[in-house]
Amino acid sequence: METFLPLNSLGCDEWVRIPFPVPAYLTVRAAGDMRRDGEGRGRFYRSVGLDPEHVYVVGQMHSRTVVVVPAEAGDGGRTTIGEHFTPHADGLITGDPGAVLGITVADCMPIYLYDTVTDARGLLHSGWRGTGILDKAIGMLGDRFGSKAEDLVVTMGPCISAASYEVDEDRAGTFAAEWGEGAVRRPAGRPYLDLRAANEEICRRNGVDLINVINHCTVRESKLGSYRREGPDRYTLMLALLGGTLQLGDK
């Protein structure tokens, strides 16, 4: 199912609630840049009443590496604002409902996972190089928590759309070889990657049927952060969170 998310539906201009069985959120550009250890991130936590002591984050290397928290967290210690930090990974899964998972995105796709039976959940950072991390996370949820595909809910958050993601032929060929021809579109003969189609294919291969796609393009929606639209020196990292409860707070 595809959904357009009302970006100001909560009367809050800094973050939106993601439609999901458990609390899930995404900051927008008005919240400022959510770079790790940055003042903007610390200010945001204070404004919404979220204690970074409960938040687990990863280094985000555009990999397919997923860690289980809290068991595998903390080899990177803490960030300067107090989050639990694990470097060299791009996804987190947990069976602890008190753990808040966090990743940042700015054209890459945040992917939220939830097992409606075991209460296990996960949050992933998935760009073109990391596409496949969803496959890894689904397998790990089964291995670590006994999750079954038919019990999983997967929500794909806002990301760069196929209409905006033109690439060269080498990248397109590599992507199509792994995720199928439907993961590359060719309007006017030029190749464009479709991250949503690739991850929908991963869900199909694993037998996951409960899929929700938030169909906003980060490049075309100015309220969202985008590396391609804003440029490498000015882009706004958005913070995706799974778990916890955010308060409207003072702007």
Image (cartoon, rainbow, N blue to C red):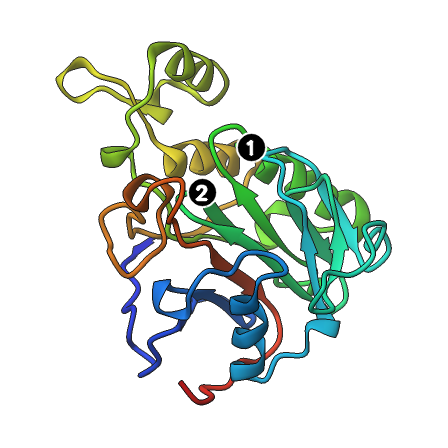
Residue 198, image quadrant:
top left
The label number, if any, that marks residue 188 in the structure image: none
Q: Amino acid at mark 1?
A: Gly
Q: Disc 2, disc 1: CB below 8 Å?
A: yes
Q: Position of residue 4 (x, y in %)?
A: 27, 59
Residue that numbered label 1 is attached to: 130
Would you place residue 232 above or below residue 212 in this image? above
* Three-letter code for the amino acid on which mark 2 is drawn: Cys
Query: From the viewer's perspective, is residue 15 above or below residue 178?
Result: below
Q: How many marks?
A: 2
User: Residue tagged by mark 2?
Assistant: 108
**Residue at horizontal 56%, vertical 70%?**
22
**Residue drawn where x is 46% and y is 60% of the image:** 33
Element marked by disc 1: loop
Name of the residue lying farthest toward the bottom: 250
Would residue 98 be visible to someone looking at this image?
no
